[in-house]
Amino acid sequence: MVRFGLFGTGHWAAETHGAALDAHPGVTFAGVWGRDPGKAAALAERYGVPAFDDVDALVDACDAVAVALPPDVQTDIAVRAATAGRHLLLDKPLALSVTDADRVVDAAQAAGVASVVFFTGRYQPDVAAFLASTAAVGGWHTARGVRFGSIFRPDSPYAASSWRREHGALWDIGPHALSLILPVLGRVIRVAAMDGPRGLVHLLLTHDGGATSTVSLTLDAPQEAVSREYVFYGENGVETVPAGDGSPATALGVAIDQLLEEIGSGTRDHRCDVRFGREVVAVLAAAETARAEGRTVDLPV
């Protein structure tokens, strides 16, 4: 049994991380820490675990951390946990800058800990199987991704999320899009970006090997326009990524399974580890620069 500490008390922490940790047969749910002690106490009571008022105290009480916090808060906790030898179950995006993402990667590699970054679709069985088979076929020239959310309406559990309002769809749902496109088309080497109405951002990506892709994202679409679609085009025709089986909590249970496999086997080569998380952050940061400066940005080789 691997002891997990949960860092975070919001909707995602409670309904996804907390539910998955509580249900997993290979996990001991060691406790909860949050920036609001009252919310931490309430969530801990819900799952029958201790509440902690100190980050390092919960790190000391666990073997692995599950973090469901804004990315800038996640970074420091991940570095502290990895430095203490704790394995990492982190949320996307890994960080809000390449510098911070590098801090997490460096700490994890120095300590030799296992890591998994949770991109929901990558842990849904039908999506994972589709990506594996599609990548194996090859011959894909381009892809189109559209993800239009509507999270700022009053009944949304994310309506009050200040980091999502500040950083928008690029950083919140952009990681999901990249996590589906990169396994098939490969590493991004060039990024262009353009803004649109209602928080829209459009990306044009060039991949190593010459394939291209486009991604359109917003968190503030009209309710009637909410949509999600990822399509690949190539030598073998047209293929659409499936919607994804099961709930986010079920997918997180799969992520926990895979992290436990890494811990047990001693391997440190998970396809969605902190190094992949850093690769995604690098693309997002390049897109941010491209938007601000109105130019195409090349990524370092």
Image (cartoon, rainbow, N blue to C red):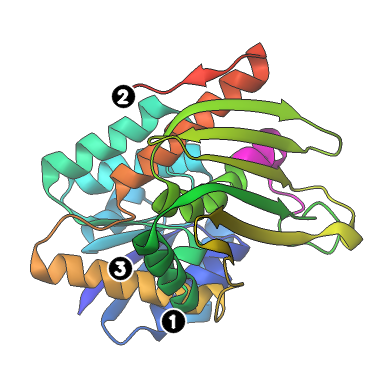
Q: Residues within 10 Å of mark 2 (few under 14, many from 20)?
A: few
Q: Tell me the crowding category of disc 3: few under 14, some 14 to 19, or many 20 or more residues within 10 angstroms, Cα based.
A: many
Which residue is label 3 attached to?
4
How far across and down, in percent of the image, does residue 256 sit? 33, 71
State which region is magenta. Answer: 159-170
Q: Which badge, 1 or 2, is on the more N-terminal residue?
A: 1
Figure check: 259 above or below 76: below
Q: Which mark is residue 48?
A: 1
Give the residue at x 57% y 54%.
Answer: 233
| Real-space Cα separation, disc 1 to disc 3, in angstroms | 14 Å
* Residue at numbered disc 2: 301
In this view, the mark in front (3 or 2): 2
Amino acid of disc 1: Gly
The residue lying toward the viewer, choosing from 184 and 101, is 184
Lower position in the chain sequence, tag 1 or tag 3? 3
Q: Nearer the viewer, residue 144 or 278?
A: 144
Asked whether, in this view, residue 274 is left or right of residue 147, the answer is: left
| Real-space CA distance between mark 3 and mark 2, rounded to the nearest whole angstrom | 36 Å
Dividing the picture into quadrants, the one containing residue 257 is: bottom left
Question: In the image, is residue 161 part of the stretch drawn in magenta?
Answer: yes
Q: Secondary structure at mark 2?
A: loop
Q: Amino acid at mark 3?
A: Phe
